[in-house]
Amino acid sequence: MLGLLSQYDWQAERTVRVGMLLPWANQVVETELPRLGLRHTVFHHARLVPASRTTAVDDSFWHGLRDAAGDAMDSLRHLPLDLTVLACTSAGFTGGPPLPPGVVTAFDALTDTLMAIGASRVVLATPYPQEVTDAEAAALEEAGIQVTARVCLGLADGYPEVAPDKIRTMLHQLPPGLVRAADAVVLSCTGWHTLNLLPELERDLGIPVLSSNVAMALHAARLVIGATP
């Protein structure tokens, strides 16, 4: 998947500016996106503070992020943005208040990227609680993407502290046949560190591995070559 980013970047004809609306405790998006080395995509960040002032994933958190999106966009209003993304995957499939016009979520970027690469069957891996993982699987199915297997860590918070070995162990517990039957593995969530693991996991599992953060970058990068985002 990282090679696809480079391919889009070399075909770039213009610079794309992306407004990233970050959950206020997210420590990972601003760390991983610059390391992708995109020369033709600029990310501008604003933070979303939910009214509950919580960080654990639940309705008050997700709905609070969506409610805060309007003010965050106002802070970016003088920037010539081509795209604005609410950089939270789970806020994209758990309902809540409508987002300002033109704002997409990390979940939207994930589904659009999977469709763009022809991945109609995926293995879903998340740090979320089981019920949130099940809700995402249902949302992917509704978008026309079959989930052949799902696995999660069962965590409601503390995603930046998830160690790489926990992610490796979780994925290697999956039946190999189910993994081979999929077109890609999805590492959902913008808040856990997965970028360093992607090449290794693709070698070990033998299929593409797509993270939420790479999906957001690909969603933006496709704009620079005139593709539909």
Image (tube, rainbow, N blue to C red):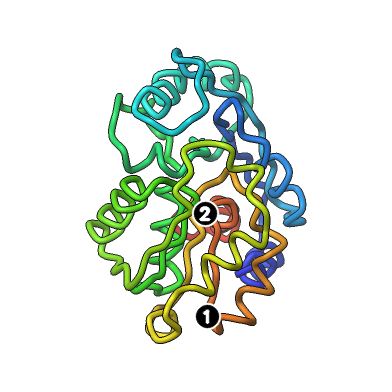
Q: Which mark is residue 207?
A: 1
Q: Position of residue 175 (x, y in %)?
A: 42, 80
Kind of residue indicated by mark 1: Ile
Side of 139 relative to 26 (left or right): left
Mark 2: amino acid: His
Rendering quarter of residue 24: top right
Where in the figure is residue 7, as x and y percent of width and height? 66, 70
As drawn, the residue found furthest toward the left would be 142
Q: Quick one: quadrant of the N terminus?
A: bottom right
Q: Earlier in the sequence, mark 2 or mark 1?
A: 1
Residue for point 73% across, 55% down: 38
Q: Nearer the viewer, residue 157 or 33?
A: 157
2 vs 1, front mark = 1
46 left or right, relative to 131: right
Residue on which the image places disc 2: 219
Which residue is at 40% across, 49% downward? 108
Along the viewing direction, whichever of 199 and 39 lies nearer the viewer: 199
Q: Position of residue 126 (x, y in %)?
A: 47, 54
- The quarter of the picture where residue 70 lies is top left
| Residue at the (67%, 59%) spot, across then down | 164
Residues tagged 2 and 1 counted as in contact (Cβ below 8 A): no
Badge 2 density bin: few <14, some 14–19, many ≥20, Cα 10 Å: many
Q: Residues within 10 Å of mark 1 (few under 14, many from 20)?
A: some
- Seen in the picture, residue 173 relative to 55 is either above or below; the reply is below
